[in-house]
Image (cartoon, rainbow, N blue to C red):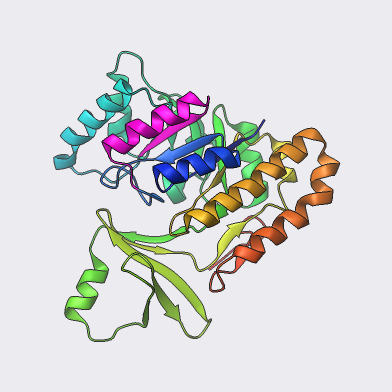
Amino acid sequence: MTELLVTPKSLTHLEELIEAGADAFVMGEEKFGLRLAGEFKETELLAAVNMIHEVGKKAYVAVNGLFHNEHLPAVEAYIKWLHDIKVDRIIFGDPAVVMYVKEQLNPIPLHWNQETVVTNHFQCNYWGERGASRAVLARELSMEEVVEIKERSNVEIEVQVHGMTCMFQSKRQLLGNYFLYQEKAMKIENRQDSKNMLLYDEERNNKYPIYEDYNGTHIMSPNDICVIEELEELFEAGIDSFKIDGVLHSEEYITEVTRQYRKAIDLYDENSDLYDDEKYGLLEVIEDIQPEYRPLDQGFLYKQTVY
């Protein structure tokens, strides 16, 4: 059965996502992981891992940041601690993480996630030979490319099926510099707080979420990927994991989306015709809760560009 992978924002949200039918959870701490839906520092992460294991599900921790030399001692200590609390998988992009994991007595399986560069099966197999058990594919791939990579890879393949994607990251604090030094270089719409702001493209009427954190500045796509009505080819290809990325979405939204994808997976597993009959109803539920300023589309799966 295809794994349903989600991104909790808090311990209470984690409980809701377990009830909603998620199989595995991506968590972490901002200084180690990129673009997390919610931050789980050590106390919360330990509680989360225990909660997840009590119900027989899996805890994945993101250690996929961009690390400089001065960060490495903290990364090494964090990797050791993750082994102590027995998380199920570690998500990485930096080879330093691989080296630290290999030093452990019983190395935790690794998921390779290098954002936009995971684009062919040679890359997946290269990191598979170096300890990765899964590759997280770039969101900029067509359906044909995804299927071919799965056919020719020796590792598990994870595909994002829902949520926004990162268009740009800079390690510089661009928003802070903007407010400090510029009077008006681009229209910015303030929504609630500094982590919910939009760059506005007046010509195309697109609104790009932008925020700053420990890892710098992130500009996100104006649309959310949603392929709940187009999962057949991914099922048929044997994709191992469907990821719902909830970054910058509310807990209520992520939970309801998780429920609908859980139904989709269960329907297909019972009978593919049942999924085919019900899939547009599942999509309608998501459309009803979708923020007005964030259209849904199918990302790059069936077209060359989404931006």
- Vertical position of residue 284 compared to residue 45: above or below: below
Name which residue lies at 27% across and 33% down.
96
Name which residue lies at 54% across and 37% down.
18
Q: Nearer the viewer, residue 259 or 174?
A: 259
Instruction: Say how many tags the image has.
Output: 0
Query: Residue 94 placed where, x, y %?
Result: 32, 38
In this view of the protein, can residue 228 be seen by the observer?
A: yes
Name which residue lies at 75% across and 44% down.
232
Q: Residue at the far top: name it.
A: 105
Residue 32, quarter of the rendered image = top left
In this view of the protein, can residue 141 be seen by the observer?
A: no
Residue 269, quarter of the rendered image = top right
Name which residue lies at 54% across and 57% down.
253
**146 drawn magenta:** no
- Vertical position of residue 86 compared to residue 115: above or below: above
Query: Residue 306 placed where, x, y %?
Result: 57, 65
- Vertical position of residue 222 compared to residue 258: above or below: below
Q: Residue at the far left: name it.
A: 70
Residue 187, quarter of the rendered image = bottom left
Query: Residue 244 placed where, x, y %?
Result: 54, 48
Magenta extent? 39-62
297 left or right of 186 in image: right
Q: Nearer the viewer, residue 115 or 288?
A: 288
Query: Residue 54 placed where, x, y %?
Result: 47, 24
**60 drawn magenta:** yes
Q: Quadrant of the N terminus?
A: top right
